[in-house]
Amino acid sequence: MELWFTEPHTENVRFSMKVDRQVYSGKSEFQRIDIFDSLEFGRVLVLDGYTMLTEKDEFMYHEMIVHVPMCAHPDARRVLVIGGGDGGSVRELTRYESLEQIDLVEIDEEVVEACKKYLPQTAGKLDDPRVKIHYEDGLKYIRHHDNEYDVIVVDSTDPFGPGEGLFTREFYGNCFRALKEDGIMVNQHESPFYQETAYAMQRAHKRIVSSFPLARVYQVHIPTYPSGHWLFGFASKKYHPVKGVDWEKWEKLGIKTRYYNTKLHAASFALPTYVEDILKSEEPEEEEKE
Ligand code: SAM
């Protein structure tokens, strides 16, 4: 007997993984949670039928969402992760000894519990003493924080269901306020390739551009996400993501990575022309990008 998990990437495109066995299935107040072992990608976390991560390619996502802002910020001490209950972003953050506090705001405690039990590869550092988990809607949490964080990592689901509020203008404006005067926000920014996700990424960019003085987008390759071509947003009050970055300082930290490196960091901000065109249509005319 063959078992397959199939996820629609668009109305006309599907992506399938051959399943060895299902290890967890539950329904929380917010979403359906499934974890299974696949033959090609190892263990897989699926929320409401959409792949969140696989053991084989999660390093690409988590290294790029964390090390880009952490390298660009010269002295980050306090970091907030919104979403990310699988613990992958927190795991990467705990590799910085200089970090004093890592707040994780996850709406769904059952995601965290299931990942602690079945996905130790990502959840294994959630018990680091610097990590504090808040089980709350990120949209609400951020309303009550002012001038507190050096870096905010928005590691959300897609812009529907519980994650919808994390793509709103109100949310980005409140992240701006919750950051210190030289803070950086990064967010998962959807894919430019298929129409539906391209629209979501264009709309998110428009809202971020209107909330931050500097808003750039960088790319990453994630085989199990729709089209495999994914984007992250980099929004900043002060620091440019590439110009003036002290690459040597980051390299001296000796953090071993499998995807991220400082050359790729700089190169990931060079985007294909069709992506530049989609983004440019949402930027003010006078802005000169470098
Ligand atoms: N690291 C993942 C990846 O590789 O794509 C990102 C997905 S992570 C599991 C997304 C998390 O965001 C989910 O656990 C979900 O429960 C959480 N989430 C969704 N909406 C949220 C909200 N409004 N506030 C806080 N967390 C939220």
Image (cartoon, rainbow, N blue to C red):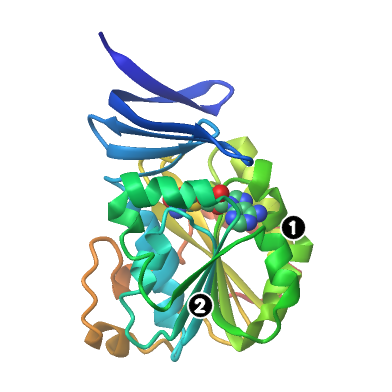
Q: How many marks?
A: 2
The three-letter code of the residue at mark 1 reads: Thr
How far across and down, in percent of the image, does residue 147 sit? 67, 87
Q: In which quarter of the image is the C terminus?
A: bottom right
How far across and down, in percent of the image, does residue 3 sit? 32, 16
Which numbered disc, 2 or 1, marks the residue that appears first in the sequence?
A: 2
| Residue at 72% in and 80% down | 177
Residue 230 visible in this rendered orientation of the protein = no
The three-letter code of the residue at mark 2 reads: Val
Secondary structure found at label 2: strand
Residue 166 visible in this rendered orientation of the protein = yes
Q: Is residue 116 left or right of residue 164?
A: left
Q: Quadrant of the N terminus?
A: top left
Ligand 1 within 8 Å of the CB at mark 2 = no
Q: Mark 1 points at which residue?
A: 168
Residue toward you, 160 or 11? 160
Secondary structure found at label 1: loop
Q: Residues within 10 Å of mark 1 (few under 14, many from 20)?
A: some
Q: Nearer the viewer, mark 2 or mark 1?
A: 2
Q: How far apart are marks 2 and 1 (CA)?
A: 21 Å
Q: Residues within 10 Å of mark 2 (few under 14, many from 20)?
A: many
Q: In this view, does 49 lie to the left or right of 86?
A: right
Residue toward you, 277 or 118? 118
Q: Is residue 154 left or right of residue 229?
A: right
Q: Is residue 49 above or below residue 217?
A: above
Q: What is the number of the mark on residue 268?
A: none
Quarter of the image for residue 259 reads: bottom left
Q: Name the residue under label 2.
A: 79
Residue toward you, 218 or 49? 49
Q: Is residue 52 left or right of residue 233?
A: left
